[in-house]
Amino acid sequence: MSDRDLESPMSAGGDAAIPLIIQAPDEVADTSAWFASQRDSIDDALLRHGALLFRGFPVTDEHAFDEVAGCLFDERLAYVYRSTPRTSVGKNIYTTTEYPAEAHIPLHNENAYQRDWPLRLAFCCLQVAETGGQTPLADTTRVTEGLPGPIVDRFRERGVMYVRNYYEYLDLPWQTVFQTEDKAEMEAFCEARDIEVQWKPDGQLRTVQRAQALATHPRNGRELWFNQAHLFHVSALDTDTRSALTGLFEEEDLPRNAFYGDGTAIAESDLAEIRGAFEREKVIFDWQPGDVLLLDNMQVSHGRTPFTGQRRVLAALGEACSAHV
């Protein structure tokens, strides 16, 4: 992979922006062999740029994406302790979040609500939506730098506490989140990850986990904003949904919510600042069939725009990273 294979799209302000586009060379006969042979160059480019878009390769189905993902990851991860609905289409290959097409998915870093997360994400577009359906990206380093210092300091000092209440027909039931029907297995999973399990008098499950607000990248040493308080907090809901849920539940019984790690409330004005920091760095590109997008999950956040028509984008998670060490 040489410099001539690389190009960067432009942001709205005219600066070079993510993702870095890598066009398929004309002479590629074996896609998997090419990715395997270029692994060192890909690793270097990913660390520098945070997001690489491989375009023009014949990645046309789940099997082809599985082979490419195997070349991009040293380790493939299962999606457990889920926060969104997805369907498995192969061994640790999943659909992207199955929210309604009209829903907007805010920018976020994958599994940043956990103390264990994938360092890499790969996406593959098999079918482009009729309209919309892009996967916006944002440089997390720039997001971190764009946040007011007092907000960063408060989050760094206190961390984030995620509270989830599991209901059979609202949000995700615990059996889906933990990918098991066995309570003992679920409880063992939680104990190993310092997730507090509470069985309420009505038999419903509540979990509480305190996690990082910022994390240090293991390869470049940068301290980065890395949490999902802005997604889990009740203020992330639209007005009608929030009103309906707060009319049904006490605050501690909402399907999901976020607090500082000491249990105190996060100011909604701070969360609005955080969402604004992500939005200011948002870059949007249009998918093409066969595109493979590789992200450094700590350096680049992602989301989804609403869409019409059919859209099929797959995802794979790789290379475990943890705040435990």
Image: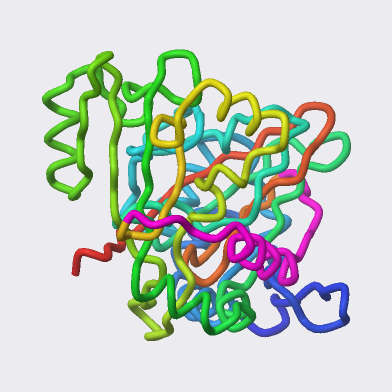
Q: Is residue 32 visible?
A: yes
- Choose top left, top right, bottom left or bottom right for residue 302: bottom right
Quadrant containing the C terminus is: bottom left
In this rendering, is residue 6 above or below 30? Answer: below
Residue 27 seen by the camera: no
The x, y position of residue 230, in whole percent, is 56, 55
Q: Quadrant of the N terminus?
A: bottom right
* Residue at x 52%, y 53% (from the top left corner): 122
Residue 11 coordinates in the image, percent (x, y): 82, 74
Residue at point 48%, 28% (across, down): 89
Q: Which residues are magenta?
A: 263-289
Question: Residue 127 falls in which quadrant of the image?
Answer: top right
Is 76 or 15 nearer to us in this picture?
Answer: 15
Q: Is 159 situated left or right of 189 in this image?
A: right
> Depth check: 191 or 94 in front?
191
- Residue at 46% from the left image edge and 43% from the top image edge: 257
The residue closer to the viewer here, 150 or 20, is 150
